[in-house]
Image: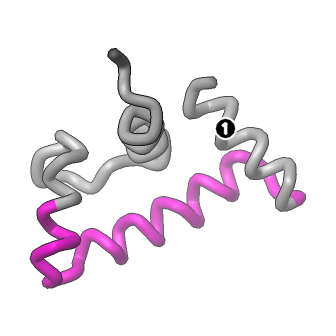
């Protein structure tokens, strides 16, 4: 399953549009990226987004690869 389908299903389950969900997620991701917690920052570096804050789609793709690594 790709990130777009996942975001659509989550939005549908919450009764909002995918765009609304992505806006909420982007705010939450941006807030999380401002942490000073080194453990969290180490994990953020794994996303391979460099210094930029990932989009919801990029973060979902990263998490999918973390949960279901390709062999």
> Does the magenta-highlighted stretch encompass residue 47?
no
Give residue 51's position: percent from left, percent from top. Answer: 11, 53
Q: Residue at x 66, y 57 (%)?
A: 21
Give residue 46's position: percent from left, percent from top. Answer: 18, 47
Give residue 60's position: percent from left, percent from top. Answer: 48, 43
Kindly report the secondary structure that dominates the magenta region of the rendered protein: helix
Q: Residue at x 23, y 77 (%)?
A: 34
Could you say which is closer to the camera, residue 14 or residue 22? 14
Q: Residue at x 37, y 40 (%)?
A: 66
Q: Residue at x 19, y 52 (%)?
A: 52
Q: From this view, report whether residue 9 is shown above or below residue 69.
A: below
The stretch of residues the image draws in magenta is 15-42
Q: From this view, report whether residue 53 is shown above or below residue 1.
A: below
> Does the magenta-highlighted stretch encompass residue 32?
yes
Residue on which disc 1 sits: 6
Horizontal arrangement in the rendering, residue 45 relative to residue 30 (left or right): left
Horizontal arrangement in the rendering, residue 27 relative to residue 39 (left or right): right
Question: Which quarter of the image is occupied by the N terminus?
Answer: top right
């Amino acid at each position: 399953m790709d990130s777009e389908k996942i975001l659509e299903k989550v939005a549908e389950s919450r009764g909002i549009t995918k765009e609304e969900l992505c806006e909420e997620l982007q705010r939450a991701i941006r807030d999380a990226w401002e942490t000073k917690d080194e453990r969290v920052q180490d994990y953020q570096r794994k996303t391979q987004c460099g210094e930029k804050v990932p989009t919801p789609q990029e973060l979902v793709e990263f998490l999918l690869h973390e949960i279901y690594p390709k062999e």
